Amino acid sequence: MTASLMAPPMVAHAEPKPTKTQVQKKLNQLNEQMDQKVEQYNQLNEKLKVAKKKLDSASKASKQEESAFEEQRSKIAQMAAAAYKNGDSADVTGFVGSNDPQAILDQAAVFSHLSHERSSQLTQFLATAQRLRREQAQAKAAYDDVKAKTKELKDQKTKLDKEVEKQKKLLRRFGTSTPSGGGHRGGSGGSGGSGGTYNGPASGPARTALNFAYAQLGKPYQYGAEGPGSYDCSGLTMKSWAAAGVSITRTTNSQWAATKRVAKSDLQPGDLVFFSGLGHVGLYIGGGKMIHAPHTGDVVKISDITSGYYLSNYYGAGRP
């Protein structure tokens, strides 16, 4: 008699439902990741602007070079015609007939011929062609490189945005609401927001900066945004101080570098307060509070920095 062994039936066990505290902790972690990605994204955007300016400048210079190139080419063509009539060279005629500097530079025979010439016109002609192509190529390469990196970073942020949305859905299941503004990531943002009025003790430029920030209360957070309908954290601080005629640059890292260090005990309204390893920045308003654009799904609002997340992740402060 053969006995058969029966394997016990598999019992499916559902994963335990995460607690509200666990979900909030995960959301905080994702928001920190987002802060760092937003900072990198903004830094690349600033580099992209610089690269674009260089490209525009190079293009403008290129047009001037092209005019000089054409003028010099005309003179050299006359010299080539004379040389051809005298039987000095058959190579130069075709080469100077080209409107493309690169075609000229690519002809080894021409270099050989030019190396024996003493004319300053020939030297200037070749130098212009070389400089024209080199400047254009360098500027375009720099621009294309930064643009590609910006797209890559934006794709990464989109993935993080989706993860944050998942966590928010879990929070809503626990009855915890998440503020929602009128903007959409990647768009121009909504123009919603109730606004507010600063009534604190600040004066001068600091008061002007805080008045601007308060007027943005309720407007949605949007990465890379500098207003008027939505903001990210450093976009809000930059525009607030710009309203007071003070330039503090665009990113959290550069704002930290552009401001004077201030001890936490010496904070004054209008100072910049930084968190999460320079991943986030807000404007101190006094009384242990700041006004800031927090993160995806939230709006410009006032938060306490003397307890909870912002207390434990405080980095430092700077005064414009």
Image (cartoon, helix red, strand yellow):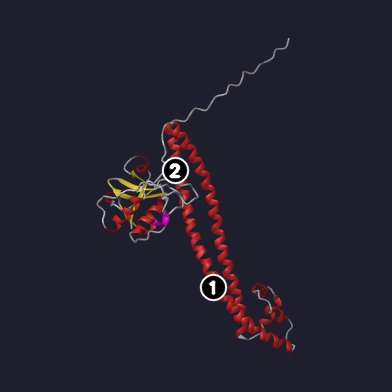
Identify the disc placed on residue 14.
none
- Between 166 and 263, the residue placed more toward the observer is 166
- Between 109 and 18, the residue placed more toward the observer is 18
Horizontal and vertical percent position of residue 295: 43, 45
The magenta region covers 250-255
What secondary structure do most residues of the magenta stretch adopt? Answer: helix
Residue on which the image places disc 2: 297
Residue 252, magenta (yes or no):
yes
| SS under mark 1 | helix
Amino acid found under the numbered disc labelled 1: Ala
- Between 77 and 194, the residue placed more toward the observer is 194
Residue on which the image places disc 1: 61
Horizontal and vertical percent position of residue 214: 33, 50
The residue positioned 71% from the left and 78% from the top of the image is 109
Relative to 79, say whether 183 is above or below: above
Disc 2 or 1, which lies upstream in sequence?
1
| SS under mark 2 | loop
Q: Is residue 200 left or right of residue 228?
A: left
Quarter of the N terminus within the rendering:
top right
Residue 255 placement: quadrant: bottom left
* Front label number (2 vs 1): 2
Residue 151, magenta (yes or no):
no
Query: How far separated are the C-alphas under marks 2 and 1?
Result: 45 Å
Amino acid found under the numbered disc labelled 2: Gly
The residue positioned 47% from the left and 42% from the top of the image is 30
Circle 2 residues within 10 Å: few <14, some 14–19, many ≥20: many
